[in-house]
Image (cartoon, rainbow, N blue to C red):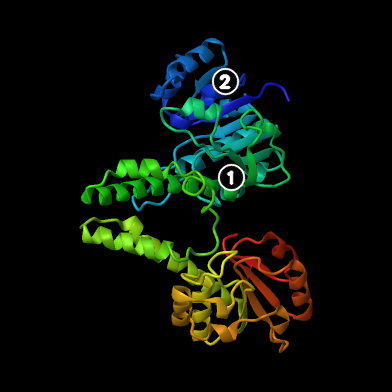
Amino acid sequence: MGTPAISVFGLGYVGSVTAASLAARGCEVVGCDVAESKVDSINAGRAPIGEPGLEELLSAQREAGKIRATTDAAEAVRETNVSIVCVGTPSTPSGALDLRYVEAVSQQIAEAVSAKRKSHAVVFRSTMLPGSTKRLAETYFAEVRDLVTIFFFPEFLRQGTALADFNDPSLSAIGLLDETQSTEPVSAMIEAETVKMSTDSAELLKYACNAFHASKVAFANEIGRIGKAAGIDASLVMETLCKDERLNISTYYMRPGTPFGGSCLPKDVSALVQHARHLGISAPMLDSLLDSNRRHLESILERVENAGSNRILLLGLAFKEGTDDLRGSAMLELAASLLLRGFSVQIYDPEVAPENLVGANKRFADTKLPSFESLLLQDLSEVSDDDTPFTIVVSKPCVSTEELGSLFAANSGVHVIDVNGWAEIAEIAPSYEGVCW
């Protein structure tokens, strides 16, 4: 493929940085915007927004003849083979997402492609909710789908370091409408380590990142307020917290699945929230953690109920793999809730032996589920066999796939609900669903 010619729709923050950076990579770039002031700025080699280094880069690329701008959408598409959509997606008064600008540009691009009758790639960089790219493809590009390849390519540019972030991104992922489609049309934009996923996944990834960043800021500020009220230097506390890159700044707690539990997290979150109240400090994020955790457990219970079987087998009871700690165990809570709803429950966890439970561990189990010892199986061969369908809820891989295969073969109508993402079981289960995937 020769030097790509790229049109960039929307010359605001993301668009102007994208246009200038691609021109610096050797692409022929045509910027397009409805605002004549932005178009005039680009054509004069001036930056339409304030960003360190952008003015100099635009001026150099304009002088080299690598970039120009126009208000004519049809012209921008006609003279390029890739269009990148970077227009704004503001909020409506109710807080919903407003896609009117993306929709307007989509229609303009589709009409221009229809007129030129040549292959064209469309890359959406505007932040949009999951399902948006698919809907835009179906609504505006249906008549030219044989000519258009569509992508969603989220941007992760920070104001103040946007040029560096574009050229050395901290994260790069591109969404495909069809997993077989080639990324060759957008090869000038993506890095070798760019992760390929569905457009829905890429759209959600952008929101997940921003929500995570917002959560971190809110969390640090709540700890800051608590610290201030207690006469503690919370900035030092948070600075030290970030030094732990094994647990705190890591992937360790970032997998969706089982609700948090154990002897520490539930009680410590509760104690910190109570302490904040005692100090007269509002900490709504911390206050919501236990409710969010409880709601996640309820969602698992709803999945079990919707599976439609009265027979339930729980694989894994302890809150964490490799332990027999039942304190804060989500599966213990789930078993108790299912029994109260009239389900027939059996539990298998080879790491939990009732005779070895002592102290707070035993007290918690006896309080939450007094009958749990009678529900525990010593071996999977003890699974009751009354030839009726049943549901298996898996919280940890406590059995071999061979044992599970034998169990599936011996029982008809088995449905598996996977709480923690055990890939092997998804391949052999006769009927399978994941809690978060």
Q: Residue at x 58, y 50 (%)?
A: 201
Q: Is residue 123 above or below residue 136?
A: above
Instruction: Report the amino acid beneath label 1.
Output: Tyr
Query: Dot 2 corresponds to which residue?
Result: 23
Q: Which is nearer the N-term, disc 2 or disc 1?
A: 2
Q: At which x and y percent is residue 86?
A: 50, 35
Q: Is residue 202 left or right of residue 43?
A: right
Q: Residue at x 75, y 80 (%)?
A: 412
Instruction: Report the amino acid beneath label 2.
Output: Ala
Q: At which x and y percent is residue 394?
A: 62, 70
Q: Which mark is residue 254?
A: none
SS at badge 1: helix
Q: At which x and y percent is residue 194?
A: 63, 37
* On-image quarter of the N terminus: top right
Q: Is residue 77 left or right of residue 41?
A: right
Tell me where residue 233 sits by quadrant. Answer: top left
Which residue appears farthest toward the top when viewing the image? 63
Q: At which x and y percent is residue 279?
A: 21, 57
Q: Is residue 367 visible?
A: yes
The answer to whether marks 2 and 1 mark residues whose Cβ atoms lie closer than 8 Å is: no
Query: Dot 1 corresponds to which residue?
Result: 140
Q: Residue at x 53, y 15 (%)?
A: 61
Q: Nearer the viewer, residue 372 or 171?
A: 372
* On-image quarter of the C terminus: bottom right
Residue density around tag 2, few if under 14, some if 14–19, many if 20 or more, within 10 Å: many
